[in-house]
Image: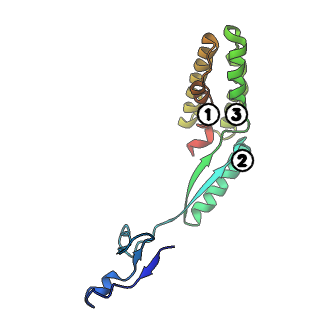
């Protein structure tokens, strides 16, 4: 922790009050002024918290409602929450399995069957939360369509590089719950 210093002895008494609270940073020879506050000295920055929810915490509509309740409570207490949500349930595992199946089956790969359970999970969750006509759900549907095309390309080319695998897995993160 930085050491708080009084004004250096060579500073006149007139300037000394302005220098109180200067910070001596480790490894330096002189003190520096503390960083300026936004909004003046009277403005207090809102408290912030990062809230991380894993896959089982957002696996279905019921759990998403619980997460929303927790976030609402934190916000009501005057804390500004920043959310980090994992993919719903076992979505990432499903995407990796679909990519492996695309390589193994080649042109005979049935992409709709492979990602059907992921589509169903998101559609069921959107319906339960009454979000079928929402913009976030429309984005999820568009991403799942793009995922299908990516997996079709993997199957046709017989290529699953690390870069493409990362792209396939990236479709797990933008989920229905991320729009809240």
Q: Tell me: 131 left or right of 113.
A: left
Residue that mark 3 sits on: 91
Label 2 vs 1, first from the N-terminus? 2
Q: Position of residue 88 (x, y in %)?
A: 69, 39
Marks 1 and 3 sit apart, C-alpha to C-alpha, by 19 Å
Rendered residue at 67%/33% (across/down): 122
* Image color mode: rainbow
Estimate how packed mark 1 is, as few (under 14), some (14 to 19) or many (20 or more) residues with alpha carbons within 10 Å: some
Quadrant of the image occupied by residue 92: top right
Label 1 vs 3, first from the N-terminus? 3
Q: Between 37 and 100, which is closer to the camera in this rendering?
A: 100
Quadrant of the image occupied by residue 21: bottom left
149 to 60, vertically: above or below: above
Q: Between 123 and 159, which is closer to the camera in this rendering?
A: 159
Marks 2 and 1 sit apart, C-alpha to C-alpha, by 21 Å
Rendered residue at 58%/18% (across/down): 149
Marks 3 and 2 sit apart, C-alpha to C-alpha, by 13 Å
29 to 104, vertically: above or below: below
6 to 170, vertically: above or below: below
SS assignment at label 3: helix
Rendered residue at 67%/49% (across/down): 53
Residue that mark 2 sits on: 57
Q: Position of residue 178 (x, y in %)?
A: 58, 42
Q: Which dot marks residue 132?
A: 1
Estimate how packed mark 3 is, as few (under 14), some (14 to 19) or many (20 or more) residues with alpha carbons within 10 Å: many
Rendered residue at 66%/41% (across/down): 129
Query: Which of label 2 and label 1 is nearer to you?
Result: 2
């Amino acid at each position: 922790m930085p050491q708080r210093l009084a004004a250096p002895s060579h500073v006149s008494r007139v300037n000394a009050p302005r220098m109180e609270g200067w910070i001596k940073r480790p490894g330096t020879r002189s003190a520096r002024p503390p960083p300026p506050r936004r909004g003046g000295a009277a403005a207090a920055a809102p408290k912030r918290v990062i809230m991380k929810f894993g896959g089982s915490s957002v696996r279905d509509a019921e759990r998403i409602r619980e997460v929303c309740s927790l976030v609402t409570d934190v916000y009501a207490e005057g804390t500004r929450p920043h959310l980090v949500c994992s993919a719903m349930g076992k979505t990432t595992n499903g995407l990796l399995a679909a990519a492996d199946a695309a390589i193994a089956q080649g042109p005979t790969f049935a992409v709709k069957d492979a990602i059907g359970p992921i589509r169903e999970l998101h559609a069921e969750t959107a319906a339960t939360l009454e979000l079928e006509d929402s913009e976030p759900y429309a984005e999820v549907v568009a991403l799942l369509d793009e995922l299908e095309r990516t997996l079709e390309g993997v199957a046709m080319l017989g290529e699953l590089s690390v870069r493409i695998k990362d792209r396939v897995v990236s479709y797990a993160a933008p989920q229905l719950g991320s729009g809240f």
